[in-house]
Amino acid sequence: MPIDASKPTPLRLWGFLLTVGGGVLVAFGALQLWVNATVFGKAILGWEGWRGVDLPEGLIALVCGVVLIIGILVLRGVRGKTKRVIAVLLIIAGVIAFAVGGVVAVTAANRFANAQAAATQLAAAESIPVAEALAKVSGKLSATVGVGVFVTMLGGILGAVGGVLSLALVTRPPVVAPSTEPEEA
């Protein structure tokens, strides 16, 4: 099969760039800090927070990022209905990456502000009983969403838009060149 070295159409170029860029952002965001728990507004001693890959949602996002990057490359080498299937998978991967980041962002305060776990960390760091540490952290513990969640969500949006552009490219009817033969009267 010969390689097409012609200049890509704007639709193809933007679909490719947005999908790859989105995939890279999703994967990069999954490796960054997603949630950080603090007591009195300070990070818990010896605690670095949760990176995306520390959570099931972050692992899902990482897989979605890889699917976006590899999928757009595979899309260029397949034919027929397979192109449509892959383009739809790109859209789904982008939407899932956005959704899992959104779920973590919305639920972080309730899900990760675990007073018992923080008290255990504080007790070990300050060499005090857990009950005393629990009294210190009760009501003063908060969880903040890290930048990785937002990078992942942005990447998910870009990847989904790139997938939509790719789907538009593979579903449009082929352009037929005008005939150069004279019409019969």
Image (cartoon, rainbow, N blue to C red):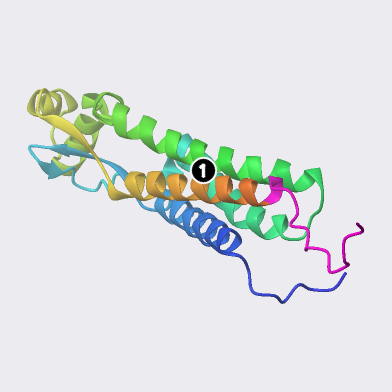
Q: Quadrant of the C terminus?
A: bottom right
Q: Residue furthest right?
A: 184
54 relative position to 163: left or right: left
Kindly indicate the quadrant of the structure image that contains residue 102: top left
At a point 64% along the width and 40% down the height, the residue shown is: 88
Is residue 182 at least partly visible in the picture?
yes
The percent coordinates of residue 65 (x first, y second) are 53, 50
At a point 59% along the width and 57% down the height, the residue shown is: 69
At label 1, the amino acid type is: Gly
Residue sitting nearer the eye, 35 or 43: 35
Q: Quadrant of the N terminus?
A: bottom right
Residue to which mark 1 is pinned: 94
**Labels in figure, total:** 1
- Image height of 16 relative to 141, above or below: below
Is residue 171 found inside the magenta-colored segment of the image?
yes
The percent coordinates of residue 175 (x first, y second) are 74, 57
Q: Residue furthest bottom?
A: 5
Q: Magenta segment range?
A: 170-185
At a point 54% along the width and 59% down the height, the residue shown is: 20
- Image height of 81 relative to 14, above or below: above
12 relative position to 146: left or right: right
185 relative position to 51: left or right: right
54 relative position to 145: left or right: right
